[in-house]
Amino acid sequence: YVHLNKLVLKSSNKITSKGHSLLLLLAGVVLISIHSGFIQYHQIMGNASYNKVVVGNQTENSELASNDYPKNIQMANEHLTKAFKYGLYTPASLNRQLASVYISQNRLNDARLHFTELINQLPDDMEARYRYSKLLIRAGDHKGAMEQLEAAALINQRTKKEKTIKSQ
């Protein structure tokens, strides 16, 4: 007999139904842990490549930045896309990063999808609305761009009113 507290896991060299249930539960925990590690790896590697692109754009040595830019943007794309595709949850930061990567690759429709999701996640994000409006203008959707800019202006007005009320 193999016992775990009062549970009989194995009896007469056969695994009991409770033993099978425990094995199934443990296998599930192992699989979820492996999946989580896979997603974390791609998120970390994607963030590192993405940050190299962002820092490279801000560095004074533009020749060095331009040499590594295509490689870093491709690496960011590959890793962040895997984290998005296989993850159980998509944080707003991942949508923001993927939208930026896709814009740099001139994949406007893909960027549009991530901006839409980002704005659904963070409706008061003025920067996302402003950048999305720029994308919509590039795509020829001037009406949609105006809607995003108007929404950003309303958020800005509401924020100013809230600051005024808090300061009184």
Image (tube, rainbow, N blue to C red):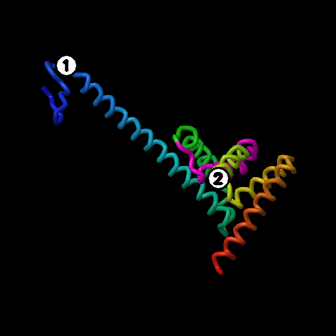
State how far apart marks 2 and 1 are (Cα). 53 Å
Would you name the residue on which mark 2 appears? Answer: 96
- Could you tell me residue 13's position as x and y percent? 15, 19
Viewed as shown, does residue 15 lie left or right of 125?
Answer: left
Question: Which residue is drawn at the image coordinates 70% and 43% (left, top)?
Answer: 113
- Could you tell me residue 24's position as x and y percent? 33, 29
Check disc 1 and report its element: helix, strand or loop. Answer: strand
The quarter of the image holding the C terminus is bottom right
Question: Which residue is drawn at the image coordinates 64% and 53% (left, top)?
Answer: 96
- Could you tell me residue 18's position as x and y percent? 25, 26
Q: In the current view of this chain or complex, which residue is farthest to the bottom?
A: 168
Viewed as shown, does residue 115 lie left or right of 50?
Answer: right
Q: Is residue 97 visible?
A: no
Q: Main secondary structure of the magenta part?
A: helix
Residue 14 picture quarter: top left
Numbered range of the magenta stretch: 89-110
Viewed as shown, does residue 126 lie left or right of 146?
Answer: left
Q: Nearer the viewer, mark 2 or mark 1?
A: 1
Q: Is 31 located above or below residue 136 in the figure?
A: above
| Amino acid on which disc 2 is placed | Arg
The quarter of the image holding the N terminus is top left
Of label 2 and label 1, which has the lower sequence position?
Answer: 1
| Crowd around label 1: few <14 · some 14–19 · many ≥20 (10 Å) | few
| Amino acid on which disc 1 is placed | Lys
Would you name the residue on which mark 1 appears? Answer: 14
- Could you tell me residue 158's position as x and y percent? 72, 66
Question: Which residue is drawn at the image coordinates 66% and 46% (left, top)?
Answer: 117
